[in-house]
Amino acid sequence: MGEDSESPKINHSFLRDYVTEADVISTVEFNQTGDLLATGDKGGRVVIFQRETESKGESEELGESGEYNVYSTFQSHEPDFDYLKSLEIEEKINKIRWLPQQNAAHFLLSTNDKTIKLWKVSERDKRPEGYNLKDEEGRIKDISTVTSLRVPVLKPTDLMVEVRPRRIFANGHTYHVNSISVNSDGETYLSADDLRINMWHLDITDRSFNIVDIKPANMEDLTEVITAAEFHPHHCQLFVYSSSKGTLRLCDMRESALCDKHSKIFEEPEDPGNRSFFSEIISSVSDVKFSHSGRYLLTRDYLTVKVWDLNMEKGPVETYQVHEYLRSKLCSLYENDCIFDKFECVWNSTDSVIMTGAYNSFFRMFDRETGRGVTLEAWRENSKPRAVLRTRRVYTGGRRRRGDVGVDSLDFTKKILHMAWHPAENIIAIAATNNLYIFQDRVNAENQ
Amino acid sequence: MQDPAPIGLSLPQLAASRCNLCWRGRRSSSFTIKPGLQTLMTLAIKEHEQHERLEKLKTLFGLPVNKAKLTSQRTRLKNQNGFHLCRLGREVYTFVSTSRMSGSLLNMFSKGTKRKFSDGDEEISDESLVGARVASSYSLQRQSLLDMSLIKLQLCHMLVEPNLCRSVLIANTVRQIQEEMTHDGSWHMVAEAFCSAGQSPSERLVATEVLCRSREQDAEPKLFSVISYEGCREEEVVADETLCSVSVSDTVSNVCLAGRIGQCWEKSELSGVERDEEALEDSRLGSGEDEEIDTKDRASTESPKTIGQVFGTFEIKNGSPGPDSALEELFSDVDTSYYDLDTMLTGMQSAPKMGPYDILDSLAPSHSSPSIVSTPNCRSDLNELDHIMEIIVGS
C-alpha cells in the first residue's frame, strides 16, 4: 500500500500473544477407545479431534500412527442469564465426559455451570440419490417429465459429521456444576455442584435424584463445599466426592437414598509442623480420580498429589510433591488468587504413572513404582513437532544447572489445569490456555 | 454532651482489620470511632468505581470535586507493610488528617500508616522492642492477611456469580484469623475499645433467636436461597458474621461481634420490623439489582411441579421498584451492608465514648435506637453522607 509507506511500522507481535478469553480451553477428555479427544473452552464450544489411522506398513509399531485432527466443532452452551438472580451464567464448558459407545454414533455429556447436555456425534458419508419425485437439487420434479421409475441408491459422499443435542438436563443445580461422571451401568450419571450431587438417568431430563446434599440449614454455617465427584469405574453403587477441607467421602447408594452419610471418609491428619493460615486452602482437593483398577484414588490438592487405597482411610499411601517450592510463597499466591487454582490429575492406562499440571506451562509426571517425578513443559516455543521433550527443573537450591528456572521467574499466568491421558496408550493431551498439546511417549510404545 | 452511638462502631471486620480507625485530635489513650470515617472506610473498601460515585455525589451536592485518584488495589495490597495498621502495643494512632479526607480514600490508608510508623517509633522507644517487634510482625502479617481476605470477599464481580468454593475458603481463613486473635487477646483489645461491656453474649443470643424465629416464620426453608454466599454483598456479610459468630470469650463477644450482622441480610426473613427497612433497601438499591434482597425478600412460594420436590422451591424476586432519582442511581450499587451492620451494632451501644469531633458524631440519628434490628433510615444515611461530604470538603 503506497499510501502507508510513510507511516511508522506498527509492531504487531503482541497480537500473536494475545489470547481471546473465549479460546481458553477449560476441559479435555479422551473417549473410551482414545480415538476421539474432546476439548471444551470458555466460549462454550466443543472441539472434537479424531485420531488418524494410517495404513500400517510392515514394520509398523503400534502407536506409531495417529495424529489427532479436528473432527467436529460445535457450540455446546450459550451464555445465559439467570433472571431470578440477575446474574450471568457463563457458557464455559466445565467438564466433558464421553459415554461408552454402543452404536455407530458417539455420545458425550458437556456441562457448563448450570446445564448438562447430551450430544450425539454421528457421521454421515452416504446419501441417497435417484429420487423419482425430486431432482438432484431437491426441487420437485414436474410429474410429466418422469418417464420411468427407479430405486434410489445410497452413494458415498464426503464425510459429514453431525452433532445434535439429544438431551438437555437443565435446572438441576443452584450452584456451579463442577463435575459429571458417567456410571458404569451405562444408564445414569452424576453431576456435582458446590453443595449437592444429583444423579440423572440419561433418558430422563425433567427429573433427577439428589444423592448428596451438604447445604447447611443456615448458610452462614457453610464451611465446606464439594469440589469433585466421580463414580467408581466398576461398581455402579459407589461414588466418591471430595471437599474443600481435603476430605474424600466414599458413598454407597445401596445404603440409603440420600448419601449424606458416607460409607468411608478418607482424611489425612494435618501435619502440625506445616500449619499456617493457608493450611486449609491448600488442602482443598481440586480433583479426584479413581484408578482404572478401581482400587485407588488419586487426589490433587494445591501442592501435592496423593494416592489413596480404598481400603485404608487414615491416610494416602503415596504423596508426591508437585511444587513444594511454592510453600513459602503462599501469601503472594493467595493475594493473586493463584492459590485457588484447580488443577486436574490423571492416571495412565496401567495406573503406574500419574500426572498433574503446575505453573509456567510445566506439568509433572510421577512414576509410582520408582517414586520419581519429572517436570515437562508444554510451550510451543520450546518444542517442535516430533521433538523429544526435555525435562525441566525449578531451581530450589544447590547446584544450579543450565535451563533451571528460578521460583521467582515462574509465570503464574501459564498454568496447566486440564489434561487427559489416553485410556490405552501413552498419549497425553495437555491444555495450556488456548493451546492443546498432544504428546506421545514413543519409547514406551516401542516396548509394548 | 450528647453521646449518640457512633456509626459503624466496629464493623467487626473493619474493626479487626483497621484496628480502630479513629481520629486523634490529641494524643490520648482513649480512642473513638468516627462515624464519618467509618462510613468512608466502607466506601473505600469498594472498587474504585465507588470513588467515582463519591465524586458524582459531590457534584450533585455542588461540592468541589477532588480529582485525586485512588491508588490501585494492587499497589495497596502490595504495600503490605504500609497497609495494615500496626498495633505496636498502642491502640491509638493517627490515621489521617482532616484536610486529606476528601477524595482519595485509599490514599488515606497509606498516609495513615506512614504516620503510624513515625508515631510508633516515638512511642515505643522506651519499651522493650525485640519481643514486641517479633510478636508484632506476626500480628502484622496476620492483620494484613485479614485485610486481604476481607477485601477479597468484598470485591467480587457483579455480573457473574462468584465462586462459592473460593468464598468459603476465604471466609474460613478470616474465621481462623479471628479465632486466633480472640485467643491471644488482640481481638479483646479491639473489641473493648468500642463496646460497652457485658451485653454482647445475650445480644448475640437474641440476634440468633430473632434469626431463628424469623426463619421458622418462613413458609419453608429456601433451599436455593444462598443467603450468605450468593453474590458479593452477601459474602461481605458472611465475613462480618463469621467474625462475629466465632467470638469465644464472653467478654470478648461484645457488640462488635454480636448483632447478627449476617442476619442483616436475612432481615427479609424477619417479619415486621424489617419490612420498612426492606422497603427502603429495595427502594434504595433499585429493583433488578441485588439478588440477595430478592432471595431473602419474600418467602419462597411455589414448588415447580415440573421439576418436582427434589429441587424445593425457587425464590421469587419481588423487589419493589425504587423511586427514580439520580441519587437512587448513585446509591444503587452501593452496598449497604455496612450501613446496616453499623446500625445494628451501634443500636446496641449504650454509652459510646465520643471524641472531639462531635460533628461527625452527631451524624447518625438513627443509631440511637437500641433495637438490634434498628432500621437504617434511608434518608438518614443520605443526610449522613451529605454531612460527611460537607465536612470533608470543608464547605
Image (cartoon, rainbow, N blue to C red):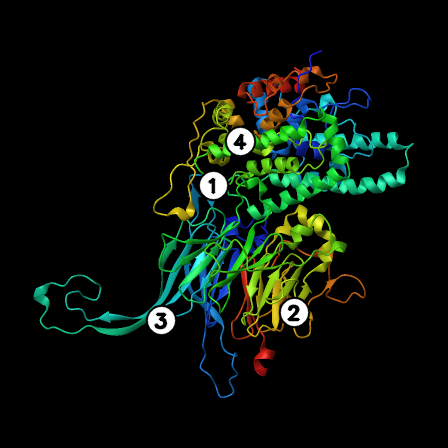
Residue displayed at 75% across by 16% down: B356
Label 3, residues with CA under 10 Å away: few <14, some 14-19, many ≥20: few
Question: In the rendering, at what x and y percent does residue B385 appear?
Answer: 60, 21
**Which sits in the foreground, B295 or A382?**
B295
Q: Chain of mark 3?
A: A
Tell me whether circle 3 and circle 1 mark residues in contact (CB < 8 Å).
no
Chain of the residue on which disc 2 is drawn: A
On screen, residue B342 versus residue A182, left or right, reads: right
Query: Which disc is residue B333 wearing?
Result: 4
User: Which structural element holds mark 1?
Assistant: strand
Specify the label residue A327 is tagged with: none
Task: Mark 1: give few (<14), some (14-19) or many (20+) Cα within 10 Å.
Answer: some
Q: Which quadrant of the structure image shows residue B220?
A: top left
- Say left or right for A331 vs A202: right
Is disc 3 placed on a helix, strand or loop?
A: loop
Instruction: Give the chain letter at badge 1.
Output: A
Q: Residues within 10 Å of mark 2 (few under 14, many from 20)?
A: many
Asked if badges 3 and 1 are on one and the same chain, I answer: yes
Q: CA distance from mark 2 to mark 1?
A: 41 Å
Res A104 label: 3
